[in-house]
Image: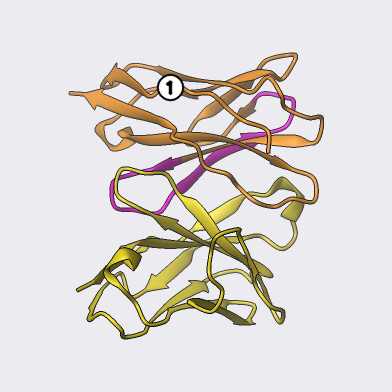
Amino acid sequence: DAKTTQPNSMESNEEEPVHLPCNHSTISGTDYIHWYRQLPSQGPEYVIHGLTSNVNNRMASLAIAEDRKSSTLILHRATLRDAAVYYCILSGGSNYKLTFGKGTLLTVNP
Amino acid sequence: GAVVSQHPSRVICKSGTSVKIECRSLDFQATTMFWYRQFPKQSLMLMATSNEGSKATYEQGVEKDKFLINHASLTLSTLTVTSAHPEDSSFYICSASLPDRPSTDTQYFGPGTRLTVL
């Protein structure tokens, strides 16, 4: 499976934007970039996914580098409820599995 | 849309007993469901992939006779932990993928089941 690299932790202030980076230099042409987040004692929650173009939804934006070797999850205005572990995962082709790494623990300060 | 539920949310059992965990897709039909396990302070580890009407595919190192998976309908998969021991205590999470978009691999997760074996 193609690997991703994320910072172990990041901190943000409430109502400020947050940019969560992810490196995936070995991404293949068919790999989708997925972001999930997990709040304490809960199952992961789907955030966003993309292939080549930048994507927006009600939760976040996903900016994908032109060479696709990195991406950034953007939370436009962090709230205390956004404090979670954020996972960047590659998956694609006939392999439907998601391989979770350690993710980035986001702390949001009031 | 794409809601997945799990039952029970929490279970405590004695060593040697079996525990069944249910995973349901509430508003869609899931041809593929996944079972994960998460130990404290660790990430999710995929245990098995379950396809409706066929045998589950287990990840390396996961004992299929200990973790029985049944996916009898398009909305229900069950995981039975047989002869549970304290080392099986963990957070068990299921997920399901949308049948019309399997190639994107997006999965929707249940809230998890906390199993404690005494």
Taking the spot 26% from the left edge, 25% from the top edge, the residue there is A108
- Chain the render paints yellow: B
Please, what secondary structure does the residue beneath circle 1 have? Answer: loop
Quarter of the figure that contains the C terminus of chain B: bottom left
The residue wearing badge 1 is A76
Q: Is residue B67 left or right of residue A77?
A: right
Residue B36 higher or lower than A1, as above or below: below
Where residue A104 sits, quadrant-wise, is top left
Query: Chain A colour?
Result: orange
Quarter of the figure that contains the N terminus of chain B: bottom right
Q: Is residue B99 left or right of residue A74?
A: right
Asked if one can make out residue B78 in the rendered structure from this viewpoint, the answer is no
Position in image of residue B84 (x %, y %): 34, 77
Q: Is residue B103 left or right of residue A100?
A: right
Where residue A107 sits, quadrant-wise, is top left
Q: Which residues are magenta?
A: A37-54
Q: Per the image, is A39 magenta?
A: yes
Q: Per the image, is A83 magenta?
A: no
Q: Is residue B114 left or right of residue B109?
A: left
Position in image of residue B38 (x %, y %): 39, 53
Position in image of residue B95 (x %, y %): 53, 61
